[in-house]
Amino acid sequence: MLAVENLEVVYDDVVLVLRGVSLEVPRGAIVALLGSNGAGKTTLLRALSGLLDIHEGEVTKGTISLDGVDVTHRSPAQLVGLGIKQVLEGRRIFAEFTVEENLRIGAHAAKTAPKESMARVFDLFPTLADRRRATAGYLSGGEQQMLAMGRGLMSDPSYLLLDEPSLGLAPRLVEQIGELIVEINRQQTTVLLVEQNANLALSIAEHGYIMETGKVVMDKPTTALLEDEDVREFYLGMAHEGETKRSFRDVKHYKRRKRWLS
Amino acid sequence: MTQLLQAITSGLGQGAAYALIAVGFVIIYKATSVISFAQPALMAAGATAVALLTGQAGLGFYTAVVVAVVGAALLGAGVERTVLRPMVGKPVFILAIITLGLDVVIRNVTNRFIGFNVRPMNDPWGLDRTTLLGITIQHRHLAALVTTAVLLAALYAFFQYSRTGLAMRAAAIDQEASQAQGVNVGTVFGLSWAFAAALAAIAGVFIGAGSTVDQQTWVVGLKALPAIILGGLDSVVGAVVGGLAVGVVEALFATYQGTYMPWLGSNFSIVAPYVLMLMVLLVRPYGLFGTPEVQRV
């Protein structure tokens, strides 16, 4: 289990971004992490994968533990070695590399030869197999997202942290990405899914966390979240039953105080 | 005609050494976006080490070269770890100035070892030459060309096929994304400095070969600057072409300028590479093989 306890993260020694976040990702699950822009979702992932350093961020309080072992201040290379792998937001593939080279670099920390993992990735994403010699920068957006996820899987991680895999993709592709995440999870990889697309995230996850301004404000199984009135209204864009159409003014966030903040 | 070919071959031989230094510049630049001005000093240090090891310590020439190259690589990696690593994330301008300081320090220490004497290189080539189809080729130039070709082929294979080479290329493109794959970017920086220093040391051997090492040897290393700038800072191919071009232009001017352009004065061949660099920059500001920078002003 990957567990975060009372985590505080500060950027540039002054900007407090995470204010005591606690979260648990049990082995084998898909856990969704929702929240609006600037809530601290990506920062939490960076803390988990050790990538805070490059952004001048620092964990000032709290712990991150992997199966009970404290891994709070490990380097990215060590954490990848322990099986925690982040797929960065915005894909961030190596555009000048070929598809195959991108996958090979994904296996940098793997102990086994990249051949087997590559076969697994090509099995999951057949389009990548067809374009293995193509320059990665010329792939379509959907293919690039698949490449980014495939690159993440190359080191056979036990925890895959996905940062907005649906970003900038057409609805049908979003659906496909969702199915692929379920399939990846079925192959024994635990997934922590950060999403703006709450529909996608809540449809495949078992448990969900909602973050707002650096805090976890809600922590429930997805079935409970889907029934929650506030989540339905603010994240899924559904009106209350009985009310049909409402003017935009009524849905403006600041007009209506969210119940969980009180 | 013979004279022209003669000038070109000796220019290529000399240019091969410049190319090696220039490739070192490019490797560091690609990995860390810093132009390391310490290359000429590392080149002189390598040459001095070989001269002292063969002369004073009585080692065989090839053993001395291996010791000097390994030593230079360790020095490069050590300097990166102790002096430059703490500055990671600072503006590259600051880092470049630090390398200038490093250059001065390494040069001064090296000069202490050289003293006021000129040190013979004790290389096996000396000024031996072979005549082939009417063109005389010096053995040291032949050795420089062959060594450069072999080293470049090895570097190409390393960057293309090896796990570490791929990681170095990845880190040059996107540091965060490569860290997320488990690449230790610090190791990549250290390695690129080690590579650059080793290449500089080998270049130093060829610059000193058939001649001597003295306190002014490092100046020759500055020729790599026009080479990388006209080739393009971020291109290994550019560095090689640039290095060879600088060597050839220098040799051509040394051969013909006295006859055809005597009004330029003597020793203009030393300036010629820089003139070539200026002309290339007027047409292609990012160098012959460099990536054009997309930037809004």
Image (spheres, coloured by chain):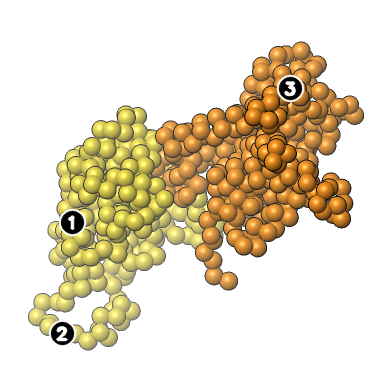
Q: Is residue A1 left or right of residue B74?
A: left
The disc at residue A176 is 1
Q: Nearer the viewer, residue B177 or B3?
A: B3
Type of amino acid at the residue the image marks with label 2 = Lys
- In the displayed structure, would residue B137 be above or below residue A132? above
Please name the residue shown 41% across and 34% down the image: B161
Crowd band around label 2 with a 10 angstrom C-alpha radius: few (<14), some (14–19), many (20+)? few
Please name the residue shown 27% across and 51% down the image: A146
Q: Is residue B45 left or right of residue A111?
A: right
The disc at residue A245 is 2
Quadrant hosting residue B144: top right
Quadrant hosting residue B141: top right
Q: Of tags 3 and 1, which is closer to the observer?
A: 3
Chain B, chosen colour in render: orange
Give the chain letter for yellow.
Answer: A
Q: Position of residue B125 (x, y in %)?
A: 72, 21
Q: Looking at the image, which residue sits at the far left?
A: A242
Q: Position of residue A157 (x, y in %)?
A: 30, 39
Q: Is residue B287 left or right of residue B181?
A: right
Residue identifier under label 3 = B128
Chain under disc 2: A
Type of amino acid at the residue the image marks with label 3 = Asp
Spatial CA distance of label 3 from label 1 is: 70 Å
Q: Position of residue A147 (x, y in %)?
A: 30, 49
Crowd band around label 1 with a 10 angstrom C-alpha radius: few (<14), some (14–19), many (20+)? some
Chain under disc 1: A
Chain under disc 3: B
- The answer, for residue B261, to whether it is visible in the render is yes
Please name the residue shown 60% across and 32% down the image: B148
Q: Secondary structure at mark 1?
A: helix
- The answer, for residue B221, to whether it is visible in the render is no
Q: Secondary structure at mark 3?
A: loop
